Image (tube, rainbow, N blue to C red):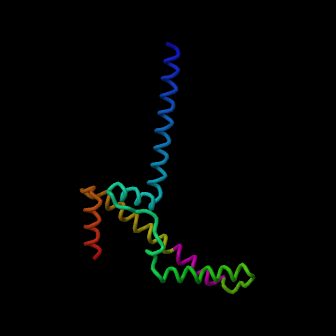
């Protein structure tokens, strides 16, 4: 009987550890706006895998190329590229903050919507935004 109790306690402990791990994973997913969006879209069957380079706008690729060139100049001792890089960093930080705010707004609307069907919600949002 003692052996069964030990197995039962060990099994219960393992189950508790697995549940604790799942809760932590869920928290990390829902804490990050991008991971949350990917998770919710994935639940509804939308493939939100990694972006492929063919999906990137050419203007962005050109800007990244120019910034990489400026970084190389700085690494080589030419400090004249610093203002360009600092401006780009400020610009990207602003774009990231704006995107995060837009995602947060969409999450709030989704959470408050009577329909939890993400396809229906996305269509309604697209119609409102158009």
Residue 60 at what x, y percent from top left? 50, 80
Image position of 48 with respect to 29: above or below:
below
Q: Which residue corresponds to the image point at 41% horizontal and 59% vertical from the top-left?
A: 38
Residue 28 place in picture, x, y as percent: 49, 52
* Residue 56, percent from left and from top: 46, 76
Q: Residue at x 42, y 57 (%)?
A: 36
**Residue extent of the magenta highlight:** 82-93
Determine if the magenta segment contains residue 31.
no
Quarter containing the C terminus? bottom left
> Could you tell me what secondary structure mostly forms the magenta stretch?
helix
- Give how far across and how far down residue 27 sits, in percent: 46, 49
130 or 65: which is nearer to us?
65
The residue sitting at the top extreme is: 1
Left or right: where 123 falls relative to 103: left
Q: At 40% across and 56% down in the image, what residue appears?
A: 39
Q: Check the image and report above or below for 17 versus 91.
A: above
Query: In terms of depth relative to the viewer, which is nearer, 21 or 102?
Result: 21
Residue 73 against residue 55 in the figure, above or below:
below
Residue occupying image coordinates x 63% and y 82%: 69
96 and 65: which is toward the camera: 65
Left/right of residue 128 with respect to residue 86 in the rendered view: left
Q: Is residue 88 magenta?
A: yes
């Amino acid at each position: 009987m003692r052996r069964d109790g030990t197995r039962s306690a060990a099994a219960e402990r393992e189950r508790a550890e697995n549940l604790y791990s799942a809760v932590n994973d869920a928290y990390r997913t829902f804490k990050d706006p991008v991971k949350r969006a990917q998770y919710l879209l994935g639940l509804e069957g939308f493939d939100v895998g990694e972006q492929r380079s063919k999906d990137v706008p050419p203007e962005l690729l050109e800007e990244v190329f120019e910034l990489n060139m400026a970084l190389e100049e700085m690494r080589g001792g030419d400090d004249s590229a610093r203002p360009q890089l600092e401006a780009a960093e400020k610009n990207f930080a602003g774009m990231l903050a704006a995107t995060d705010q837009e995602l947060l707004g969409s999450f709030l609307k989704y959470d408050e919507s009577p329909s939890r069907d993400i396809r229906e919600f996305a269509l309604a949002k697209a119609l409102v935004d158009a």
